[in-house]
Image (cartoon, rainbow, N blue to C red):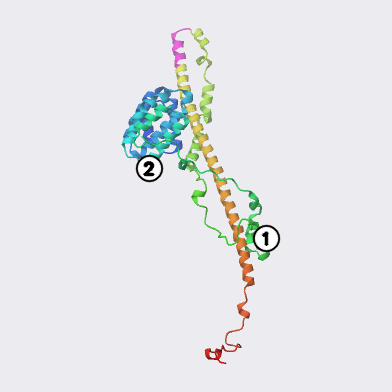
Amino acid sequence: MALFNEDGLKKKLNDLNMSQQSIQTLSLWLIHHKKHAHTVVNVWMRELMKVSDARKLVFMYLANDVIQNSKKKGPEYSKEFLKRLPKVFEHLGAIRLDGKSKQGVERLLAVWEERGVFNESAIQSFKKGYEGLKNISIKASKTEQPPAKRPRRSSSLGAASDEDMESGVDSEDGEDSNAAATAATATPAGAVVNLSPPSPSSAPPLKSPPDPELLISSLQSLESAATADAATREQIAKMPTAVSDSSSLAKLKDATEGRELLKVVDEALKLLLEYNGRLAKEMESRKALAKLLHDSIRHQKEKIVHTEEMLEEYRVKLAKVLKIKAELRAHLQNLPDISRMPKVGSTLPPLPSAGDLFTV
């Protein structure tokens, strides 16, 4: 874990972006340096007021992540942010945020209020300072709630294999009738079959997956991790016992031996500090990688469910089309065969004229 200093913090804030990985990585680093919470929050506020309006929301998201995830380790950040947030919200209310940023700030206040991140008086002071929310309730509206997942339908229509479904399209009347009977109860007579893809509003939107390049680079970085450094571990194992056994001090005969032992201890200490730092960095990298893998697996599971629902919808629509096809063929069979009708003017007598009709 890198040592803390203001210049390093400013650089990390400057490199911060809206990706979940970027926010959580910096949040973990700040929580690790919680003893510098006072300096961190002051620098965070100064940098927030300097950046462009479009980047202010990511600073607020970072503060939210730090506040909520540091509670178990101590109240340092909650206390420091509580002192600075009223002024921050006054700043946000004084500028013209775009629609996305404004919605994000409002949602953030709603989450803090609902989860009791800060007490009611603090929330009210934030609302009062944030211009545009003085007379607005920050409770999450129904339109902000994510759309409810549709229940998975029965997979009875999916029992047939793909080959069976394909052969049903090209089959004759008998097979068409069997396939159409599947949807007979679901499709009323005269109904119009909608073959367009499902509208985006009919299904919950899929969350964007983690960046594959980031996932790959994170996995590759572990190839050179501290735990894979066998040479350093062997070097540590071969250290003399005198560097860790205080009883060896009693065996020293003169100052020369003491200085030699001190030199060996200093070298061992330097090596151990460096290796421990690498191990701590590897631990943080593995935590971030575990989060990436968890999000990636969750995204794939959501995508499987979403694809299964679409597949089932189109199977139902295919059954409806087959039913209509069977009905159309039956209707065509009931129509007269024009080719067998006599040609007009060949053997039929001429029609009577108007005068013939009124002749007595």
In depth, the one of 211 and 234 nearer the eye is 211
Q: Is residue 260 highlighted in magenta?
A: yes
Q: Is residue 5 visible?
A: no
Magenta residues: mostly which secondary structure?
helix
The N terminus lies in quadrant: top left
Q: Which mark is residue 99?
A: 2
- Image coords of residue 125 (percent x, y): 37, 29
Q: Residue at x 49, y 35 (%)?
A: 221
In depth, the one of 222 and 103 nearer the eye is 103
Q: Residue at x 56, y 51 (%)?
A: 310
Q: Which residue is mark 1?
A: 178
- Image coords of residue 108 (percent x, y): 42, 35
Amino acid type shown at disc 2 = Gly
The C terminus lies in quadrant: bottom right
* Magenta region: 253-263
- Image coords of residue 183 (percent x, y): 63, 57
For label 1, the SS is helix
Q: Which mark is residue 38?
A: none
Q: Residue at x 49, y 50 (%)?
A: 200
Q: Is residue 80 visible?
A: yes
Amino acid type shown at disc 1 = Asn
Write down the quadrant of residue 340 in the picture.
bottom right
Q: Is there a contact, CB below 8 Å, between mark 1 and mark 2?
A: no
With respect to residue 329, does 225 lie above or below? Answer: above
For label 2, the SS is helix
Q: Residues within 10 Å of mark 1 (few under 14, many from 20)?
A: some
Write down the quadrant of residue 237 in the picture.
top right
With respect to residue 182, does 154 lie above or below? Answer: above
